[in-house]
Amino acid sequence: MSRVRRLSAGLQGRLRGEMGQALIRTFIARAIAALGALALALVIGRLYGPAGVGVYALAQGLLLGAGLLSRTGMDNALMRYVGQDHSSPFVLRYLRWAVTRCFIISLVAAAILWVGRPWFEALFDATGLAGVLTGIALAVPAYAFGFLLSGFFKGIRKPATACLLENGSVALVAGVLILVWEKTGNSAGLTIIGYAYAVAAWLVALQGGYQVWRWCRRQPWWSRRAEQATSSEGAPVSLAQFTATSRAFFMTNLASFMQQVLGVMVAGWLLSSTDLGLFKSSQQTATLIGFILIVINAIFPPRFASLYHQGQIAALGRLARQGALLGAVVAAPLLLLCLVFPGWVLSWFGDGFQNGAPLLRMIALAQLVNVSTGSVGFLLNMTGHERLMRNIALICNALGLLAFFVLIPPFGALGAALALAFVLVVQNLVALLFVWRRLGIWTLPGPNLLALIGIKSSVVR
C-alpha cells in the first residue's frame, strides 16, 4: 500500500504542472472523439436496431481499411519529421508529399468501394450495405486527409487539435446529420448513414485544412520563405527517406488493421447482421473503459523517449507506473458499470441490444487488462524496441484472427468477443513481459509478479 501511496503522491504532483494541463486539453478532445463514435452507434441502434449497427460496422471497417491503405503510414511519418523541427519551412514540403500520394491512393480505394458495392453486400449477406457504401466511398479521400492533418498537428505540438480530426469528430457530426435528416420525415433508410459520413468527413477535413493554413500564416517563414517551403531543394529529409519511414510505420499499423478491419470483416462474414450489431455495440461501449489509456498515450510517449535518452530508467519506470495507476483509477467506475449492469448499459442502444450483455462483460474484462498494464507498447516503441513491439502485435493479432475463425462457428457473437478479448489480453501481457525483460520496468502499481515467480530482467543496475 505504501508503494501505491508514493505513486499516487507523485502522480498528483505531475498533474499540477504542464503535464496536467496537456492531459486536460487532450482528455477533452479525446472525450469528444470517443463520445462521438459511441453517439453515432447509439443513433444507428435507436433508428435501425442491431442489424443496422451490424451493417454500419461492416461499412466502417471497409472505410478504416481504405483509409489505412491510403495513408500508408504517412500520418506517422509527418508526426516524426514535422516534430523534429516544426519551425522549419520544409514542413509544408512533407505535407505536400503526403497529401499528393494519399489523394491518388484514396481515389483508387474509393473507386474500388464504389464499384464493388454489390459484391460486398453479397459477400457478407448484409442487406443495405451497398447503399451505405455509396456515401462511404465518397468519404474515403476526406477521411484519409483528416488523418494526415492529425499527424501534422501532432508534429507541431497540438495533440488536442489532432484528436479532433480523427474518427470521433466525423462520427459525431455524422450522427447529428442523421438525426436532423430523420426529423424531417424523409427517411432514406440505412443509405443515409453513408451520405452523412461523407458530408461529415469533408467538413472535418476542410476545417483541418483551414487550421493548417492559419497556423502557417503565423510562421515567420510564411511571407519570406514561402517559395522555399514548397521547393524540392534543400529539404533535410528526402522523398525517399520519407517514403521508407512511411512504409515502416505502415507495417506497424498492420496489426491494428488486422484487429479493427479484418476482425470485423471475418465476424461480418460468419455472423448475421444482428449478431454483428451486438458485437459492435459491446466493443464500442467497452472501448470507453480504455479511453483514459488513449489520452495517456497521447501525452506520455515523448516523455518516455526523453527519459530513456537521458538514461533515467528509474524515473521512466515511475512515470509508466503512474500512468497505469491513473488509468486504472479513472477506468474503474465504468468497468464496474459494464460488469454489474451490462444489460442496462446496452439498452441505451435500443431494444434487442440487452442480449449482448455477456459480450460486454467479456470485452470489459479484457479492457481492464489493457488499462492496468499501462503503456507497455509505447514503452517498447520509444526505447528502441519498436521491431519487437511490431512483431508482438502482428503475431498476437494473427492469432486473434485465427481465433475468430475457430470460436465464432461454435459460440456465435460470444466467440467474436472471446477472440477480441484474447488479442487484448495476450498482446498486453506479452508486452508487459518484454518491458520487464528488456528494460527492467514493472508497469503495474502493485508487486512485481514476474520477479516473484523467478523471471529475471536482462538489465543490470
Image (cartoon, helix red, strand yellow):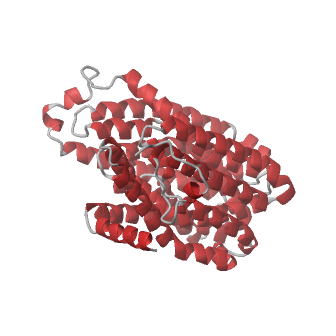
- From what the image shows, is residue 148 above or below residue 97? below
Q: Nearer the viewer, residue 113 or 15?
A: 15
- From what the image shows, is residue 212 above or below residue 171? above
| Res. 50 visible in picture | yes
Q: Residue at x 56, y 72 (%)?
A: 183
Q: Residue at x 18, y 42 (%)?
A: 219
Answer left or right for 51 relative to 37: right
Q: Residue at x 38, y 48 (%)?
A: 206
Q: Nearer the viewer, residue 133 or 415?
A: 415
Dividing the picture into quadrants, the one containing residue 417 is: bottom right
- From what the image shows, is residue 24 above or below residue 339? above
Answer left or right for 415 relative to 192: right
Query: In the image, residue 217 lies at what x, y percent?
Result: 20, 43
| Res. 189 visible in picture | no
Q: Residue at x 87, y 56 (%)?
A: 410
Query: In the image, residue 263 lies at what x, y percent?
Result: 69, 48
Residue extending farthest right: 410
Q: How many marks?
A: 0
Q: Nearer the viewer, residue 454 or 348?
A: 454
Query: In the image, residue 131 lies at what x, y percent?
Result: 67, 51
Q: Nearer the viewer, residue 209 or 150?
A: 150
